């Protein structure tokens, strides 16, 4: 069996479209086939701080994801 590829999903940031970015990321992450891919969510807070992987586990109501 081949190793799963990792897909990074970047979202958030300093933008007037911040909330839209969060909702879009939620939809994209929950649509990814977790049998084929690992997900590396990268959340950019309003203050510009980047948070990735298991540090953000549980935010946005993600389904069970094997965070990279």
Image (spheres, rainbow, N blue to C red):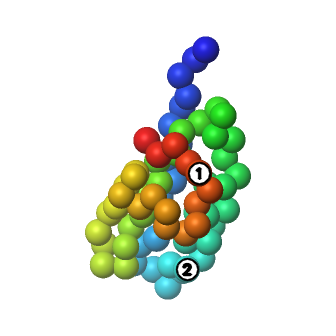
Residue occupying the point 67% across, 62% down:
27
**On screen, residue 56 above or below 46:** above
Q: Which residue is mark 2?
A: 19
Percent coordinates x, y for residue 17 in the rendering: 54, 80
Q: Which residue is mark 1?
A: 64
Q: Is residue 21 visible?
A: no
Looking at the rendered structure, the secondary structure element under dot 1 is loop
Looking at the rendered structure, the secondary structure element under dot 2 is helix
Q: Quadrant of residue 21?
A: bottom right
How many other residues sit within 10 Å of disc 2, few (<14), some (14-19) or many (≥20)? few
**On screen, residue 2 above or below 53:** above
| Callout 2 touching callout 1 (CB < 8 Å) | no
Query: Which one is in front, 15 or 65?
Result: 65
Percent coordinates x, y for residue 14 in the rendering: 39, 78
Residue occupying the point 56% across, 48% down:
65
Q: Quadrant of residue 44?
A: bottom left
Q: Is residue 23 visible?
A: yes
Percent coordinates x, y for residue 36 in the rendering: 64, 32
Q: Quadrant of the N terminus?
A: top right
In this rendering, position of residue 54 left or right of residue 20: left
**Gap in Å between the C-alphas at discs 2 and 1?**
22 Å
In this rendering, position of residue 55 left or right of residue 20: left
Percent coordinates x, y for residue 67 in the rendering: 47, 46
Query: Which one is in front, 5 or 56?
Result: 56
**On screen, residue 64 above or below 61:** above
Q: Earlier in the sequence, mark 2 or mark 1?
A: 2
**On screen, residue 8 above or below 3:** below
């Amino acid at each position: 069996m081949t190793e799963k590829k990792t897909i990074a999903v970047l979202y958030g940031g300093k933008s007037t479209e911040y909330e839209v970015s969060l909702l879009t990321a939620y939809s994209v992450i929950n649509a990814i086939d977790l049998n084929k891919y690992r997900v590396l969510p990268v959340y950019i807070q309003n203050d510009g701080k980047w948070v990735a992987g298991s540090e953000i586990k549980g935010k946005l109501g993600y389904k069970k994801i094997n965070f990279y």
